[in-house]
Image (tube, grey):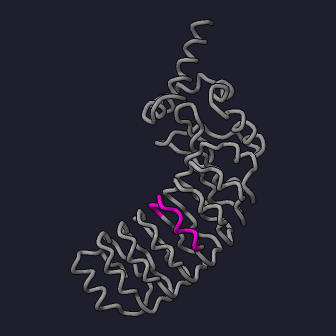
Amino acid sequence: MLAKKRYKEEIAQRFIYGNTKIQSFLREEGYLKDLSREEILSLIKDGDIIAKLGMLLGKPLTINTRLNPDSYGFVVENGVIRWLSLDNCGINKVPEIVRELKLLKGLTLSRNSLETLPEWIGNLNQLEVLDVSDNQLRAVPEVIGSLQNLKQLELQHNNLKRIPPFIGDLQSLVVLYAHSNRIKSLPETIGKLKSLTDLIVGDNLIEIIPESIGHMLSLKRLDIGENPIPKLPYSILYLKNLKSLLLKGLDTEFSSLLNNLRRRKVNIVK
């Protein structure tokens, strides 16, 4: 019995404090089947919160790894819960208890019925990835602008009418998905996103692309297709790292600008 107990403790410790490859190996080879959920959660910081969250939602959360994510579960890194996925679980508001997971790096809440996000989400200041796609959001709360470590923000497939000016405060942002909304304009402050490589805002109601877009010198992929845009700003030529420009569904010809971009080997999709 003592040997078995030590064996189980060793497996639990290796999983909780191991790197992603070790975690995936232990999970795929079935080692975690020797452990109860309670045994694992008892060794994890804030494991009690995960247990309560599972009870609240009526289903225990899956123990995930970064290499084998599940749409409903959590990931542990160095004994701490770092990633939480509550996709497609029928919620219309973010459970209040999530605010206690202050060390989260990733939070995905896609395919639910969220109309708003709580103000306290701005206190999760270690967030690097926030996915609230495929909901019913009408606005992005200003507190999102305080998430200075955020690298990826997914807002696609909601009911947003605008991208707020404070988006420019997200200086670490690398990827912004906001396609398939009802967005009518992009703020001038979007040009402050110096680290952004992917700006995906196709399938909206955007009429004007601000000149400030030319300041986004890290931009590699720009999707503005399926929008009523009559012309492109000349500053788009300043995007020296641009590799792909998606203009699907745009009727207007931007011949001189596009010819210039083609000479620079930019892949233009119409």
Residue at 30%, 69% in the rendered image: 241
Give the residue displayed 43% in from the left and 83% down from the top. 211
Q: Is residue 21 above or below residue 7?
A: below
Q: Quadrant of the C terminus?
A: bottom left
Q: Which of 43 and 38 is in front in this view?
A: 43
Does 37 appear in magenta? no
Q: Residue at x 61, y 79 (%)?
A: 182
Q: Bounds of the magenta span?
A: 165-175
Q: Residue furthest left?
A: 263
Assess whether residue 167 is covered by the magenta stretch: yes
Q: Which of 181 and 144 is in front in this view?
A: 144
Q: Is residue 215 above or below residue 101?
A: below
Question: Which quadrant, please, contains the N terminus?
Answer: top right
Hey, which quadrant is residue 218 in on the image?
A: bottom left
Residue 229: percent from the left, percent from the top?
Answer: 47, 88
Q: Is residue 133 left or right of residue 208?
A: right
Q: Where is residue 192 in the image (x, y as percent from the top left)?
A: 46, 70
The answer to which image quadrant residue 36 occupies is top right
- Residue 190 locus on image (x, y percent): 49, 73
| Position above or below: 111 against 248 | above
Residue 124 location in percent, x, y? Answer: 63, 50
In the rendered structure, the answer to whether residue 118 lies left or right of residue 80 reads right
Residue at image point 46% right, 82% down: 210
Total numbered labels placed on residues in the image:
0
In the figure, is residue 216 to the left or right of 123? Answer: left
Q: Nearer the viewer, residue 150 or 71?
A: 150
